Amino acid sequence: MEPLTAHNRRIILASGSPRRLELARRIGLEPHVMVSHVPEIKGAHETPQEYTRRLAILKAQDVAQKLIDSSEPADWILAADTIVVFEGDVLEKPVDFEDACRMLGRLSGQSHTVITSFCWMSRRTREGQENLHAICSVEARVHFRELDEAMIQRYVASGEPMDKAGAYGIQDVGSTIVRHIEGSYFCVVGLPVCEVIETLQDLGGLVDYPF
């Protein structure tokens, strides 16, 4: 499949996640990567879904701001945010070894929710006004097997959990601690590709996809 652009406009992935970039490439997109820098602090009265939606929008806006002086044609910006929710608590990326072990200990033998929200946005204009095209949230339920302390410590020591919400990666060794999921696997990885493409098609950004 030829690399896709949206009506010959450059697609920007506002994320440094190698998993999101890999998924985008698998579905025929070849985005340019421009990492966003947004403080990830949940508001006291925000629901988990509201939190991820706000972050996805802020990440897209951050990259749109960086493109103000660009001479490129108007771009599509894709930003996303993924969190794990367990017993009402938001579990993001662990801050250290102990934090990762604590998260996995809580999730052991239990079920939790993964929420990924993504935003498609056109580049901000020189007048400073951005065009927010669409924001979408996808949820999945993930069921863990029982984990003993030694298993948790070995897994965390591998380094795999440290850059992942909830301290596990379902696409790698972490798949062996997941009993089953309900909903979108790609939501858990961090980019729900069906909804991402469907939303861009609805916006008129893709024609005759996938062939």
Image: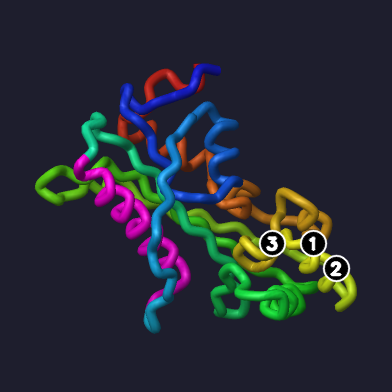
Which contiguous range is marked in magenta?
Answer: 46-69
Residue at 55% x, 58% y: name it.
139
User: Which residue is at the front of the view, 77 or 162?
Assistant: 162
Of pointers 3 and 1, the one earlier in the residue sequence: 3
Disc 2 to disc 3, C-alpha distance:
21 Å
Amino acid on which the number 2 mark rests in the picture: Arg
Placement of 36 over or under 12, stated as above or below = below
Say what amino acid the circle numbered 1 marks: Ser
> Residue 38 in the image: x percent, y percent?
38, 64
Q: Could you classify mark 1 by the number of other residues whose Cα lies within 10 Å: few (under 14), some (14-19), or many (20 or more)?
A: few
Determine the image quadrant of residue 177.
bottom right
Quickly name the residue at label 3: 142
- Model colouring: rainbow
Viewer-nearest of discs 2 and 3: 2
- Is residue 77 rendered to the left or right of residue 156? left
Residue 113 in percent (x, y) is at 61, 66
Label 2 sits on residue: 154
* Circle on res. 80: none
- Tag 2 and tag 3, C-beta contact below 8 Å: no
Identify the amino acid type marked 3: Val
Q: Label 1 belongs to which residue?
A: 158
Q: Give the structural element (helix, strand or loop) at label 3.
A: strand
Residue 168 is left or right of residue 127, and the answer is: right
> Which residue is at the front of the view, 185 or 175?
175
- CA separation in Å, label 1 and label 2: 6 Å
Instruction: Looking at this view, name the residue that lies furthest to the left.
Output: 127
**Label 1–label 2 contact, CB within 8 A:** yes
